[in-house]
Amino acid sequence: MIDLDELHQSTAAGDVVPDRLATRRKMSVRLVAAFVVGGVLGGFGVSELRDLREERERNASVALVAFPASIAGVGSDVPGVLQLDGQLAVTNASQAPITVRAATGQGPGALVRDTGKSRLLRPGDTDLINVELRLECATAFGSELLSMRFSVETGDRKTREIDYPIALVGSIWHVRTEQPCAHFREMKKRGG
């Protein structure tokens, strides 16, 4: 019997293989190859997207630590109120660089503000920020924590506001102002 719908092709071994069957096999091999290549490329693309997303999240997150580092230049224009120059140590606990643009703090009897110089901090770096302090001897150290607000630019070029409490009681600022504050209290007792 002769099948007129199929053309036959002779192989090297002398067997006859229908053209449609050979074409189907080639098509199957091509489809499998396309799926394999597509899977590899898709997996690579998903991995790249995940890495980019993780990098964006790292660049957008901010974690910092701050504490009083030093003071100098005790002065006063009002009895019982000290005006000082100081420094605040800031550590970048994030996984990406940050730039500290501003630092301010206000609490009962305490006012702290930076002097305007930005600081770039790489992950794990600590740097000193110059600040001006205004401390009222009677109330500044009544609360242990002073809420500081930091304006920070992250790696994605966005500015974020971060609140971080710093300890005043027992800090270098507290220790260094005890004597001037004691002097003001003594003058107050004497009526002067």
Image: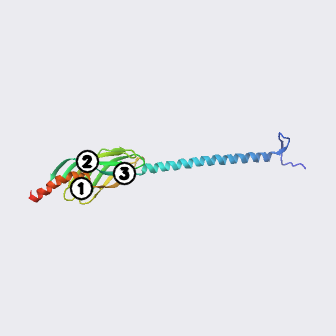
Mark 1 residue type: Ala
Image position of 165 (left or right of 154):
left
Near-viewer residue (67 or 49): 67
Residue 133, disc: none
Which sits earlier in the primary sequence, circle 3 or circle 2? Answer: 3
In the picture, measured across the screen, residue 39 lies left or right of residue 111, that is right
Q: Nearer the viewer, residue 158 or 39?
A: 39
**CA distance separating discs 2 and 1:** 16 Å
Q: Are marks 2 and 1 in contact (CB under 8 Å)?
A: no
Helix, strand, or loop for circle 1? Answer: strand
Residue 60 point in image, percent of width and height: 42, 50
**Pointers 3 and 2 in contact (C-beta within 8 Å):** no
Label 2 Cα crowd, 10 Å radius (few <14 / some 14-19 / many 20+):
some
Residue underneath mark 1: 110
Residue 127 visible, this orientation: yes
Instruction: Residue 118: give x, y in percent of width and height.
Output: 32, 44
Q: Which mark is residue 64?
A: 3
Where is residue 128 drawn, in percent x and y? 30, 45
Q: Position of residue 45 (x, y in %)?
A: 56, 47
Figure label count? 3
Q: Is residue 98 left or right of residue 106?
A: right
Task: Work out whether residue 71 or residue 39 is closer to the camera in this orientation and state it.
Answer: 71
Going 34% across and 55% down the picture, which residue do you hit? 163
The mark lying in front, picked from 2 and 1, is 2
Query: Which quadrant: the C terminus?
Result: bottom left
Q: Residues within 10 Å of mark 3 (few under 14, many from 20)?
A: some
Q: Secondary structure at mark 3?
A: strand
